[in-house]
Image (cartoon, rainbow, N blue to C red):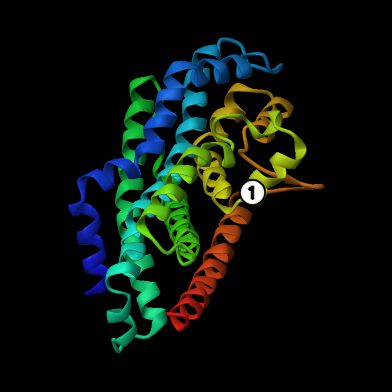
Amino acid sequence: MLIKRNITLFFRDKANVFFSLLAVFIIIGLYALFLGGVMEDSLAEIPGLSVDAKDKLDVIASLLMLSGMVAVTAVTASQGALGIAVIDKTTAAKDFLTSPAPRGKTVFSYIVGSAVCSAVMTVAALILSIVYIVIIGGEIPAFSQWGKILLALVLSVLCANSMVYFISTFIRSANAFTAFSTVLGTLIGFIMGIYIPIGQLPEGVGWVIKCFPMSHAASMLKLTLVDDELSAVFSPPAAEAIRELFGVTFTYGEYTSGYWFSALVLTAFTMIFFGAAVVSQKVHSQKM
């Protein structure tokens, strides 16, 4: 019942749904205005481009951007849905404290309810992205790719929800959460290396992106949707350089991340944030 309540409250508030997608609209707008052209020019300048393959650069650039955009949707939709948890602190906190529901189940209801809302929005973003790719000359992902796409979506949604909920346990008012959502929605494109390729950033900033768990959600989607295109259009050394430049893979010393490494990172951080959220919720409730 708590999960159903949280889902209903989110979709009932149309303005909340809209602003949950605001960061996505910003990314699309920036890409249409200048990011798309910059990315295509960067790809065209890399040596090793196969003959007569320049017409595929717009598809590759779009796939790189849209993969990150879908991962961003998981975060921003989670923000909107978890605003309910913050509002409950000021309107129904004592009701939950005196209810027989264990603290872990209350946290679970917020995360699962938010995950359902976030999943709906993320799938919608994915469908729109695929439609756009087909329109500009790309192809619908092969049947063999859908398993990895769906796993990436599930892990990104769960990780984003547990992370945002953990942060929300420290926020005591709806106004403060709105401010936090605005800041995160503005910065998330930079933190995940969407606006500026990770290879063009200072090393310290690059490490922040590589250690941010949601960057691995984007990496999983890029590896699934873009990697074959890179191998087909560029020579192996050039394709590897592009993977590092655009955050398709991440390098840690001599180790280069892959799809399953990123899946493990998202799974681990989901469990860490969920456990931390339960503890934080318990500590803060004892202070009330």
Amino acid carrying mark 1 in the image: Gly
Name the quadrant of the C terminus: bottom left
Q: Look at the image and tell me whether residue 132 can be seen.
A: yes
Q: Position of residue 139 (x, y in %)?
A: 39, 29
> Farthest bottom residue?
100
Residue situated in front as seen by the camera: 68 or 262: 68
Name the quadrant of the N terminus: bottom left
Residue situated in front as seen by the camera: 122 or 212: 212
Tell me the element at label 1.
loop
- Figure quadrant of residue 15: top left
In the image, taking residue 79 as reference, residue 205 lies left or right, namely right
Compared to residue 219, the image places residue 99 above or below, namely below
**Residue shown at 39% from the left, 50% from the top:** 178
Q: Position of residue 101 (x, y in %)?
A: 32, 85
Q: Position of residue 165 (x, y in %)?
A: 44, 63
In the image, taking residue 67 as reference, residue 178 lies left or right, namely left
**Residue shown at 33% from the left, 56% from the top:** 81
Compared to residue 131, the image places residue 191 above or below, namely below
Q: Look at the image and tell me whether residue 149 can be seen.
A: no
**Residue shown at 59% from the left, 55% from the top:** 260
- Number of marks in the image? 1
Is disc 1 surrounded by few (<14), some (14 to 19) or many (20+) residues within 10 Å? some
- Figure quadrant of residue 33: top left
**Residue shown at 64% from the left, 48% from the top:** 258
Q: Which residue is mark 1?
A: 258
Residue situated in front as seen by the camera: 259 or 277: 277
Compared to residue 176, the image places residue 89 above or below, namely below
